[in-house]
Amino acid sequence: MQVKDLMTKVVKVVTTEQSLLEIRELMLNNNLRRIPVVDGDGHLKGIVTDGDVSRATPSDASTLDRYEANYILGKLKAKDLMTKAVITVKAEDGVETAAYLMYKFKIGALPVVDATNKVVGIISDTDVFKAFVDLLGYAKTSTKITVDTQDKVGVLAELAEIFKNRGVNIISVVTRKIGPKRAAITVRADLTNAMDIIQTIRDAGFVITDISTLKVDDAHEE
């Protein structure tokens, strides 16, 4: 799955010369936490966050009246507040790249730019969470089976063969190392009419460490 499959393509942006007053109103009216700052051709120049706006806005405890505060907000420009070193991704990058960058730099969204650094979208942590849910099959009624097995070539194929022979389609598979020579394999599949496969897996020598069923209302299934 690529960033372009999840990103928001219609992006609210501001120019370097727009005032803090305009930026604040844009954020409030559109429930935004960050806005890319661009030049006249749409090329990324920086980013302004709600934190930047809050720090630059006079507090309620100040002696300034409303008109004086708005005057200050009108004088401050996006270029005065923005972060110039912006972490970005390309539309063709994998979603895992976006997720890693958000995790590493502790940010909630990334502007998506093309080869000329023009903003073509934005991807948020919510978009990444949705991809995670979709990839793991949590949007569908399914049963999760986790097995503790040897970390060796062909073990995943052996497990998949059991599902194939029973005529059960696998929704998702996740593997992780749990020791030098051990691995945990988690398979998610719809076992509504095939719960007997659990015993078949055990009979094949696999040690099942976890079984849980997730039921999703028909209205929420895709």
Image: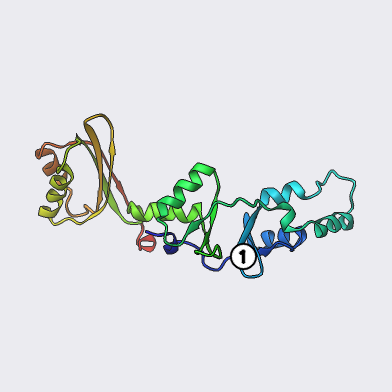
Asked whether, in this view, residue 79 is left or right of residue 163, the answer is right
Residue 213 drawn at (x, y percent): 29, 47
Residue ID at (86%, 45%):
62
Residue ID at (12%, 50%):
161
Of 166 and 10, nearer the camera is: 10
Any part of residue 196 in sight: no
Of 4 and 211, nearer the camera is: 4
Residue ID at (39%, 51%):
132
Of 51 and 203, nearer the camera is: 51
Residue extending furthest toward the top: 180
- The residue where tag 1 is placed is 12
Residue 176 drawn at (x, y percent): 29, 39
Residue extending furthest toward the bottom: 41
Asked whether, in this view, residue 195 is left or right of residue 1, the answer is left
Amino acid identity at mark 1: Lys
Residue ID at (68%, 53%):
82
Q: Quadrant of the C terminus?
A: bottom left
